[in-house]
Image: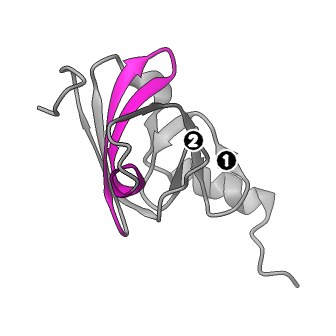
Amino acid sequence: MSDEPTLQARVEEARRLEPVRKSELHTGDWVLVTTKNSLYSICVLGEGLYLVSGGWFDRKGLSPQQTTINGCTWGGSAIKADIVAAPGLFLEFGNYVTTTRIRQVRVIRGGECGAPN
């Protein structure tokens, strides 16, 4: 018997998530994502674009970087494309960089994409 989760197990996990959905965010909203190894500051630019700082982008000298967000994975190739972040998952950016496991997510409503409120 395989240790790989079944599709049904993933569906059940998805029902228990506390995600930040892309559809719930508005231009100027900030999403602060704390992972096992990093902190990411994500500002919603609109039309599927985000301004991201922190973590990998800081280490590569690319912050702030305008990018898309593919969604979140469970650590494999299955991706939940309708969310920006959810504790327990891994965030995947449009450049295919994937974070370490997400520990905490905080949304700050409104503002400008310069510095979080």
Q: Main secondary structure of the magenta part?
A: strand
| Residue at 11% from the left image edge and 32% from the top image edge | 117
Q: Within 10 angstroms of label 1, few (less than 14), some, or many (20 or more) residues?
A: some
**Which contiguous range is marked in magenta?**
37-59
Please name the residue that numbered disc 2 is placed on.
Answer: 71
Residue 89 placement (x, y as % from top left): 51, 58
Q: Is residue 23 above or below residue 115?
A: above
* Residue pointed to by mark 1: 79
The kind of residue tagged 1 is Ile
Location of residue 73 by image quarter? bottom right
Tell me residue 68's x, y (percent).
53, 31
Q: Is residue 79 left or right of residue 34?
A: right
Please say if 31 is above or below 12.
Answer: above
Provide residue 112's location: percent of width, then percent of height: 20, 20
Instruction: Inspect the magenta stretch and tell me whether residue 38 lies in it.
Output: yes
Indicate which disc residue 87 carries: none
Q: Give whichever of discs 2 and 1 has the lower sequence position.
A: 2
Q: 14 or 106: nearer the eye?
A: 106
> How many numbered tags mark residues here?
2
Q: Is 73 above or below relative to 19? A: below
Residue 7 % position (x, y): 79, 57
Pick whichever, 65 or 43, lies toward us: 65
Tag 2: amino acid: Gly
Residue drawn at x 39%, y 49% is: 57
Q: Disc 1 on helix, strand or loop?
A: strand
- Residue at screen point 49% across, 51% down: 17
